[in-house]
Image: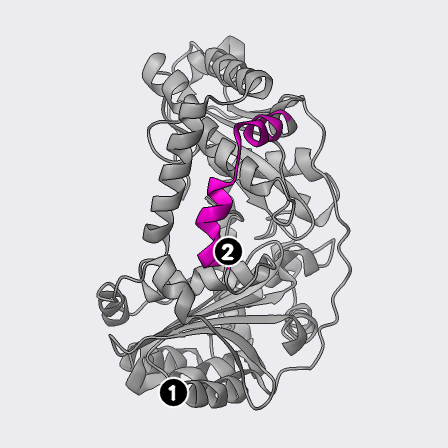
Amino acid sequence: MTHHLKFTRRFVCTLAVALAATLPTIAPSQAATKIQHLTSPGGIEAWYVQDSTVPLIAMEYAFVGGASQDPADKPGVGNLVADLLDEGSGNLDSKAYHERLERRAIELSFSVTRDYFRGSLRMLKDNKDEAFTLLHSALTSPHFDAADVERIRSQVMSGLKRDSANPNALAGRKFLEVAYGDHPYGRQTSGTLDTVPTITVADMKDYVGRVLAKDTLKIAVVGDVDPATLGKLLDQTFGDLPAKAKLTPVPDVEAAKPPQRAFVPLDVPQTVITFGSPGIMRHDPNFMAGYVVNHILGGSGLSSRLYHEVREKRGLAYSIYGALSWMEHSALFIGNTGTRADRAGETIAAIEKEVRRIAQDGPTQQELDEAKSYLKGSQMLALDTSSKLASGLLQYQLDGLPIDYLEKRNSLVDAVTLDDAKQAAKRLWGQGLLTVIVGRAPQAAAQPVAAPGPTKAD
């Protein structure tokens, strides 16, 4: 699993999604040999895979900045911008803009993470000119009309109100506050009930002017388009953006030192537990060892230690996972589970015991071999459509990886030794965990709730 919770409103055309499901399978080893580093006549760079098997084009792109560029007293600006860029631009109001997307089966969306302002564009080959024109319009001349701003603001506020009674949302929010305090990573990407009403059109225009610029832009394109045509489309779409972003510097930060524990009272029958620790940065030489050993402790599938101890052996939870999360300026290990309120203490004890065990002893050779085999095979499924491949290629660029990374990845996984894995486990979990519990107070855990609240994230 990767990183970053996203808050975004997507416009998805049914025809485009249906067609995307028919895209050809592209094995990583196959895709890697096709990846080109394209530079447009105007100097716009992209990683690019030409594939004419199906007449579709998928593009993923990102600008450095994200929610970390929100004013300290107004978290949520970038998120609101992402929700409003496709609400009318150029000579089209919101209704006309969406009608154009729908009529041409174009899927266009924007989102914000802590570090990046991201966009996604998918279309039929025959509709590429209109698709890229609509994207250019959204990026360079968004309307931010008052009626649209208030409508979208109302939707964001509704989501925040739901989150205020959602144990998973509360746990994630509190965990980041504990881990990062006053750093931008400790703030809510989508803003708060107090800050979102204060965001003005001027705030959003200022954000667009500072963040959406060519010098931090990364692009990945996969589909049925030749290099010359793509170069022209990229220039037409991104060429009018400012040459340089005006970003506020964000300092590097390490997550708070474990062990720490925080409790958020909420009268619901199921207690949510979010746990974690400082992680390993993506460019760190020990990252791959951490990635492999994380899979052994709490990764996807039914073979992880946490799944075995918490779910299979004790029946404490339906699911439990752990993941490495890396950002531009920090990294985390973060996990989550939910359990009956009266068994929360037992669940936390089981998690902590297993974390201590792997930190002290590391994995076995058999666990290491099985994890490597799974991680090498699952990568093919992670990149098996043009859209997934474009997303992967964009992420590799953002992570600063070389263009031939896909060819090298499996050998990097294979190179992890048992000693590497043991050292990574000690580094990740040797100090214990940051733990956030959301639910009923222990003394009230045995009491029934009159009106159960939500137990799953939106």
Q: Is mark 1 on a helix, strand or loop?
A: helix
Vertical arrangement, residue 414 with respect to residue 124, above or below:
above
Question: Where is the C terminus found, in terms of image quarters?
Answer: top left
The front one of 226 and 23 is: 226
Q: Percent x, y for residue 134?
A: 44, 83
The residue at 67%/33% (across/down) is 178
Q: Percent x, y for residue 409?
A: 47, 51
Badge 1 is on which residue? 130
Q: Percent x, y for residue 325?
A: 56, 43
From the viewer's perspective, tell me whether residue 423 is left or right of residue 236: right
Quick one: label 1, few (<14), some, or many (20+) residues within 10 Å? some
The residue at 46%/21% (across/down) is 364
Q: Is mark 2 on a helix, strand or loop?
A: helix
Badge 2 is on which residue? 156
From the viewer's perspective, tell me whether residue 76 is left or right of residue 456: right
Residues marked 1 and 2 touching at CB (< 8 Å): no
> What is the magenta range?
405-426
Answer whether residue 421 is magenta in the image: yes
Q: Within the image, what quadrant is residue 228 found in?
A: bottom left
Q: What residue type is labelled 2?
A: Val
Mark yes or no: residue 241 visible. yes
What separation in Å lies between label 1 and label 2 (alpha carbons)? 29 Å
From the viewer's perspective, tell me whether residue 364 is left or right of residue 201: left
Q: Percent x, y for residue 31?
A: 38, 65
Magenta region, mostly helix, strand or loop? helix
Q: What residue type is labelled 1?
A: Glu
Vertical arrangement, residue 317 with respect to residue 22, above or below:
above
Answer whether residue 217 is magenta in the image: no
The front one of 7 and 144 is: 7
